[in-house]
Image (cartoon, rainbow, N blue to C red):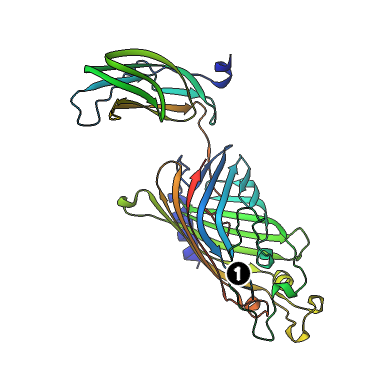
Amino acid sequence: MKYLLLLLLFVSSISWAECSVDDELCAPVGEWQLSVAIGGGVISNPLHDGKNIPLVVIPYIHYYGERFFIENNTLGYTFYENQQVSLSFIGQLNREKAYFTRWKPSHLFLPNFSETSLAPSDERTVTAEQVKKRKWAFDAGIQVNWFVNKNTMIEGQFLHDISRAYQGEHASLAINQRIKLPKQFANTRLTVAAGVNWHSKKLTNYYYGLDADDDIDPAAFYTAGSGINPFIRATLTYSINERWTVKLNLKREFISSEVTSSPLVEDKTLDVAYLGMVYAF
Amino acid sequence: MRFKLLLFVCLLFSCVSYSALAQQNLEYQVDFSVKPIACIVKHAGQACQMTITVNWLSDKPVDACLYQDNKKLHCWQQKQAIKQTFDIELAKDMLFLLQSSDKKLLAQQLVRLNKSVPVKQRRRLRAEWSLF
């Protein structure tokens, strides 16, 4: 293990490269970057009777100041940065509540796809409609970015719920790798990622645990423990011209058994698939 | 002056002459130049207002129109040599096109919008489109 670390340190010390203009992994300081994707896709909803979340029009905004940054749903302040490592305070909306939300046309950009869903057949299954309302949560914490080389970034986060909804923590660790493609694919970029999300017991139990507050059959009461969700992701981008690109985004996250054992949860994976045209303003 | 407000400096690269020959199999050739070939603003996002001088010379009289990207600036009928100035505004790099009356491309030239203060770049801290 220590040899691996030494090797990584050696590799990173010789292969880091400065940011260049036109590199999608870099952002110009002080400039707002806005793009909109129009296409089709879905975020699967693992809950019993849960409606998948449709993706049609997705706005994407990012801004990087000298220290401050916004990446769509993440606000951050970088308090330490060198050529290989960046440490930031960040805040972002917790995603778990989204699965308990009925998405309607009034939710901006997300039209209401009609979708047939089977009513729960097992007595022990419980739907989001039957339980006490779960709240949106806002998390804040620390993010570490390690730029191993020009094409590889390792990203770690440790976040705590500062909105006092679930009052717990979650963390993630992921490696993002840009894949070098043959010259004939000069306009195509492929990025893959693999990582894990860790959710504290307070988080899993708040959203997926069931108790007397939920006004359900006590036989379905459930206490969730902390869990780890491994995930993989691939993003394929084809640049048509300076402003238009085609983007394919695929992700699969394997939900921990602490969550899948909940009577609320039907699926063992969380999937995201999206194909769209992106216009950069 | 608005011009001064918008621009930090507009350098005229008049010493550089650029000519483009006809792009297609035409029965005539056109020497075409637009000067200056760049305008410099202080910061990104600023537009540049400038006066360009368009020169073109054909080996026979032609009907031709000058376009700034898709916007038509001027047309000439049966002219062989032109030197004319135009007041334009650049919000980005733009192509100036000389097209014949039947929409054939006779020549083109890019006029760049450069920033005098180079934009510093930072590594992005979230993976691209990692919002899901």
Q: Is residue A21 left or right of residue A229?
A: left
Query: Compared to A159, does A242 lie above or below?
Result: above
Q: Residue at x 23, y 31 (%)?
A: B24
Residue ranking furthest to the left: B27
Quarter of image, res A121:
bottom right
Q: Which residue is mark 1?
A: A45
Query: Compared to B96, does A71 lie above or below?
Result: below
> A75 and B109: which one is in front?
B109
Q: Is residue A281 visible?
A: yes
Count of number-bearing discs: 1
Kindly identify the amino acid type of the residue bearing the numbered disc 1.
Asn
> A274 and B36: which one is in front?
A274
Callout 1: chain: A
Q: Residue at x 20, y 28 (%)?
A: B26
Q: Is residue B109 left or right of residue A267?
A: left
Q: Position of residue A265 (x, y in %)?
A: 64, 76
Query: Compared to B48, does A127 lie above or below?
Result: below
